[in-house]
């Protein structure tokens, strides 16, 4: 029925659902429109008198007028300098680059297959990072120490030493410990007993049933890891049922041919909390698997578990800020330079910090470890200039890449992926936004559920 394909123009988007919705990112508002309006958009007939009357009546911004939009950081150099080293509540340590698996979608896959020697973090480096962090966090009621890899439990002795040192020397609030693991070392009673004793919160990578999990999560001999992992999970559950129920979560990476419903049904049976992460397509994955990659399912309203539905409701919370047009918004056009920063970039080091095996500091564990993303080290601390350079890099990329994009008010791109192709992000936002407008915006019960989801 609709042959209008150019649905993006001047920070706007047309969505076809139960109604035809016209979303304006600059006003962060939507309007239900009709075929007449779509026809005018198709013809780019923005000077027509009837079109002018139509947009005035419906409170729609004239998209024939290009607004002087300027992308800038909301934080000045002075504010960044004042807050640097004052607000960090989480320290993440990469205690080893080594891993017992060879997952084909892993962001470290190329590093594991390079000639570069994979390192363990030394106690000297770990102690410097902990001392630096603790000196800045004595006024915090709660601080978090996270351990990553590689497979962090391959350097279990260092984790033990770090935790014992923190417990003895930290004089602030109560420290909380977390780690992410592939679960293959959880067959060791000494490791399990320690993690339970120190009340660790553990995220275990589990992609779904065997046929899905073993597709990518293989060892260096191309053997799947599912059977070994499940045996270890059962062991923890039988030995420490309360810890298993309260302190363990699963995370599944959704990669084709995974089906959301299959993975959701499988994880829901564990009766534990779980999350599902979108695949970050690495160069290796693109070169070796992408031709057979089919993408993943879109979200459907029906047939998913309560846990999955609740996660999706959390994703929909961002749309609660979208307003329906009303009379006072009709003349709400931007004058002068409208300043904005699209996406969801953090200010590096404001709340968390990641330290790799060599003692280099990065904004978080998700970002690629390169020269541009390194913002300090354990010997000299944070580097204000590098923090500002990272923010400026984001602004410069966004100024070109995000110009005219309809997602600027809803996007969650950050320093990790601002320079990547973001078509999948736009597709996901479009899917979620259309679901929200079709099913939730006029449903009081759904809105209450959305508002009630914990962040």
Image (tube, grey):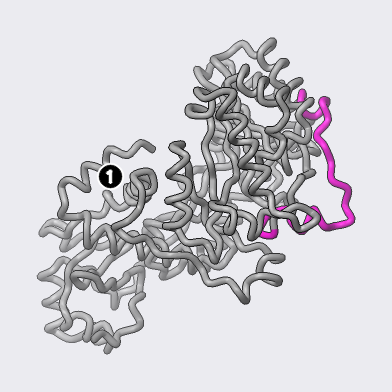
**Label 1 crowd (10 A; few <14 / some 14-19 / many >=20):** many
Residue under pointer 1: 450
Where does residue 327 sit, x and y in percent of width and height? 10, 59
> In which quadrant of the rendered image does the N terminus lie?
bottom left
- Horizontal relation, residue 434 to residue 264: left or right: left
Q: Nearer the viewer, residue 401 or 244?
A: 244
Within the magenta stretch, is there residue 322? no
Establish if 149 lies above or below 46: above
> In which quadrant of the rendered image does the C terminus lie?
top left
Q: Secondary structure at mark 1?
A: helix
Please name the residue shown 52% across and 44% down the image: 346
**Splitting the image into 4 quarters, where does residue 229 fall?**
top right
Please name the residue shown 68% across and 38% down the image: 148
Which residues lie in the magenta part?
A: 104-127
Where does residue 337 sit, x and y in percent of width and height? 38, 60
Within the magenta stretch, is there residue 109? yes
Establish if 121 lies above or below 43: above
**Splitting the image into 4 quarters, where does residue 334 fall?**
bottom left
Where does residue 23 sit, x and y in percent of width and height? 27, 66
């Amino acid at each position: 029925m609709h042959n209008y394909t150019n649905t993006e123009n001047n920070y706007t988007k047309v969505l076809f659902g139960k109604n035809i919705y016209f979303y304006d990112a600059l006003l962060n508002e939507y309007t239900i429109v009709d075929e007449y309006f779509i026809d005018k958009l198709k013809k780019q007939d923005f000077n027509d008198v009837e079109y002018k009357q139509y947009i005035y009546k419906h409170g729609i911004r004239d998209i024939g007028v290009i607004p002087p939009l300027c992308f800038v950081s909301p934080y000045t150099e002075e504010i960044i300098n004042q807050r640097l080293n004052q607000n960090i509540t989480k320290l993440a340590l990469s205690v080893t680059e080594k891993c017992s698996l060879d997952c084909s979608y892993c962001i470290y896959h190329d590093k594991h297959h390079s000639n570069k020697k994979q390192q363990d973090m030394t106690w000297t480096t770990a102690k410097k990072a902990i001392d630096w962090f603790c000196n800045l966090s004595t006024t915090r009621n709660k601080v978090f120490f996270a351990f990553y890899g590689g497979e962090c439990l391959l350097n279990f002795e260092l984790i033990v030493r770090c935790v014992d040192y923190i417990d003895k020397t930290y004089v602030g609030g109560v420290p909380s410990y977390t780690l992410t693991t592939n679960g293959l070392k959880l067959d060791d009673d000494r490791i399990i007993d320690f993690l339970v004793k120190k009340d660790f919160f553990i995220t275990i990578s589990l992609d779904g049933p065997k046929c899905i999990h073993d597709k990518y999560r293989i060892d260096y001999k191309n053997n799947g890891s599912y059977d070994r992992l499940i045996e270890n999970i059962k062991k923890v559950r039988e030995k420490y049922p309360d810890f298993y129920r309260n302190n363990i979560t699963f995370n599944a990476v959704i990669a084709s041919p995974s089906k959301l419903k299959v993975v959701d049904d499988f994880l829901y049976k564990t009766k534990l909390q779980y999350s599902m992460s979108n695949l970050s397509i690495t160069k290796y994955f693109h070169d070796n698997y992408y031709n057979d990659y089919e993408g993943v399912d879109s979200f459907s309203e029906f047939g998913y578990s309560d846990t999955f539905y609740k996660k999706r409701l959390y994703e929909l919370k961002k749309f609660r800020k979208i307003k329906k047009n009303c009379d006072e918004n009709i003349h709400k056009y931007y004058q002068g330079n409208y300043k904005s920063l699209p996406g969801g970039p953090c200010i590096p080091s404001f709340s968390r910090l990641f330290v790799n095996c060599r003692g280099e500091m990065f904004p978080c564990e998700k970002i690629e470890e390169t020269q541009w993303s390194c913002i300090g080290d354990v010997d000299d601390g944070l580097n204000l200039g590098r923090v500002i350079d990272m923010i400026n890099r984001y602004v410069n990329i966004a100024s070109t890449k995000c110009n005219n994009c309809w997602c600027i008010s809803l996007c969650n791109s950050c320093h990790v992926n601002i320079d990547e192709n973001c078509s999948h992000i736009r597709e996901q936002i479009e899917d979620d936004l259309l679901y929200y407008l079709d099913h939730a915006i006029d449903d009081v019960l759904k809105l209450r559920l959305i508002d009630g989801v914990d962040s």
